Image (cartoon, helix red, strand yellow):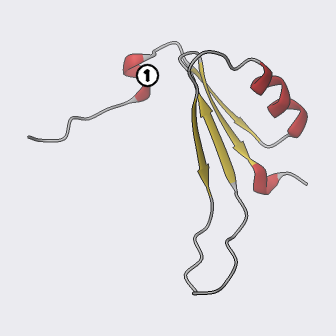
Amino acid sequence: MPTLAYHWNTIHPNAAVHYVRDLPVADDLIDNLSGPVGFDLEWKPTFIKGMPENPVAIVQFANERFILIIQLSAMK
């Protein structure tokens, strides 16, 4: 069976995407999350055995109303 093409706005066409690099803005948007929420973390992989993991660079949250992408690596 072939893989079907998928795009998030097909299912939730009114969902807004927020890309955030500012902590107060991220806090405000996180306060508005409710219902079932998807969660994901992204970071640069470490390819050398025994080396520590790199820090988390991006946190993603999503519900039916909005997608929140927080770039932690840009925050100080």
Residue 53 location (% of width, % of height)? 67, 72
On screen, residue 9 above or below 14: below
On screen, residue 8 above or below 13: below
Residue 38 location (% of width, % of height)? 55, 32
Q: Alpha-carbon neighbours of circle 1 within 10 Å: few (<14), some, or many (≥20)?
A: few
Q: Going 46% across and 15% down the picture, which residue do you hit?
A: 13
Q: Going 70% across and 78% down the picture, which residue do you hit?
A: 52
Q: Which residue in the rendered view is the most extreme toward the top?
A: 14
On screen, residue 38 above or below 21: above
Q: Which residue in the rendered view is the most extreme toward the left?
A: 1
Q: Amino acid at mark 1?
A: Asn
Q: Which residue is mark 1?
A: 9
SS for dot 1: helix
Quarter of the image with the C terminus in it:
bottom right
Tell me the quarter of the picture where residue 33 sits.
top right
Quarter of the image with the N terminus in it:
top left
Q: Nearer the viewer, residue 17 or 64?
A: 64
Q: Which residue in the rendered view is the most extreme toward the front?
A: 50
On screen, residue 41 above or below 54: above
Q: Nearer the viewer, residue 20 or 50?
A: 50
Left or right of 21, for residue 51: left
Q: Going 67% across and 45% down the picture, which residue do you hit?
A: 59
Q: Going 67% across and 84% down the picture, which residue do you hit?
A: 51
Residue 6 location (% of width, % of height)? 32, 32
Tell me the quarter of the picture where residue 40 sits.
top right
Residue 47 location (% of width, % of height)? 55, 81
Left or right of 25, for residue 50: left
